[in-house]
Image (cartoon, rainbow, N blue to C red):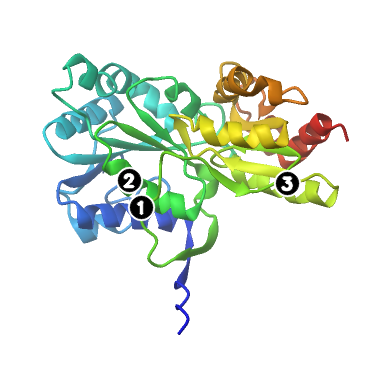
Amino acid sequence: MSERAPEQVATTYREAVRAGLREALQREPRAFLMGEDIGRYGGCYAVTKGMLDEFGPERIRDTPLSESGFVGAGIGAAMAGMRPIVEVMTCNFSLLCLDQILNNAATIRHMSGGQFSVPIVIRMATGAGRQLAAQHSHSLEGWYAHIPGIRVLAPATLEDGRGMLWTAMNDPDPVLIFENIMLYNMGGTIDAAAGAVDIDRAVVRRPGRDVSLLTYGGSLWKTLEAAATLKEQGIDAEVIDLRTLRPLDDATIMESVRKTRRAVIVDEGWRSGSISAEIATRIVEQAFWSLDAPITRVCTEEVPIPYPKHLEDAALPSREKIEAAVRKVVGR
């Protein structure tokens, strides 16, 4: 008899993340959630809606509007043996607890000579596209990828949105998860039994032979759309979902670039000092002699994100910008 195909269930990215949180709380009695408005309100993006009623106030903890305070409390809880999952409402607010992340969470293992670890998971929304203007539309994951001592994840698919959390919780060191705000309403189907996923390796989302498109997070879907259009024009693009920004999976990146001999990096962060600049440098260091064309980057324009919709769209990477960059790289 043939094996029965896995049951598929309809869901959204928001619901997939919620399922991952519920599973973590059910499987790990030391786990608890904390953050602003995650309890009674259900979270700014409704990810934790209903979880207070299910798990109670001891495990779903609303916090004051003090990122430095509650992230610091999470670090202390992690050092004491708990498994806190801390939500920072948007990544721009994480600047208010940057001292806790950079000078405490990321350094305690090193400074204690390995005597202490900080197994904390910090989730935060990132990205633009919802007209939240210059102070609430940041993409700062590249900044955090600069910091030794932490792991930085950018789940782009339903499976990763659900499964990365459990893997992250089993990491003895701090893990930051950046969830692009434009993905929360994304719908699709997922294996009903979907579970933990690898957080060490990038994934080839679309194989190709002419050019490597390297991206992550919310830009993955724009890049896949661009690749589909380019295929109709005779350009076969390979799309790599980086998934983990620290540590980068150099092996998968270089294997793709050595095959296609061209690279376009799509990054919603600003161009200067970005994760795209780091990736480009690593390609030059490790695969320069395989390149047939200069490395190209498609990034957010170097401006504070505008509020008007047409200007916000113009500032961000788009399918059209990606297609134009690829055509230039392949000489079409």
Q: Would you identify the image quadrant in which residue 214 lies? A: top right
Which residue bears the numbered disc 3? 227
Q: Disc 3 residue type?
A: Ala
Q: Do the residues labelled 1 and 2 touch (CB within 8 Å)?
A: yes
Residue highlighted by disc 1: 196
Query: Which residue sits at x=39%, y=61%?
Result: 194
Alpha carbon separation for disc pair 2 and 3 = 30 Å
- The reply to whether residue 192 is visible in this rendering is yes
Instruction: Provide residue 286's location: percent of width, then percent of height.
Output: 59, 21
In the figure, 31 relative to 73: above or below?
A: below
Looking at marks 2 and 3 on the same chain, the residue that comes earlier in the sequence is marked by: 2
Question: Crowding near pointer 1: few (<14 within 10 Å), some, many (20+)?
Answer: some
Residue type pointed to by label 1: Ala
Classed neighbour count for the residue bearing mark 2: other residues with Cα under 10 Å, few (<14), some (14–19), many (≥20): some
Residue 307 image offset from top left, x and y in percent: 62, 32
Marks 1/2: CA distance?
6 Å
Q: Quadrant of the N terminus?
A: bottom left
**In which quadrant is the C terminus drawn?**
top right
Q: Which of marks 1 and 2 is nearer the N terminus?
A: 2
In the picture, the disc for residue 316 is none
Report helix, strand or loop for mark 3.
helix
Towards the viewer: 164 or 55: 164
Residue appearing at x 36%, y 52% in the figure: 196
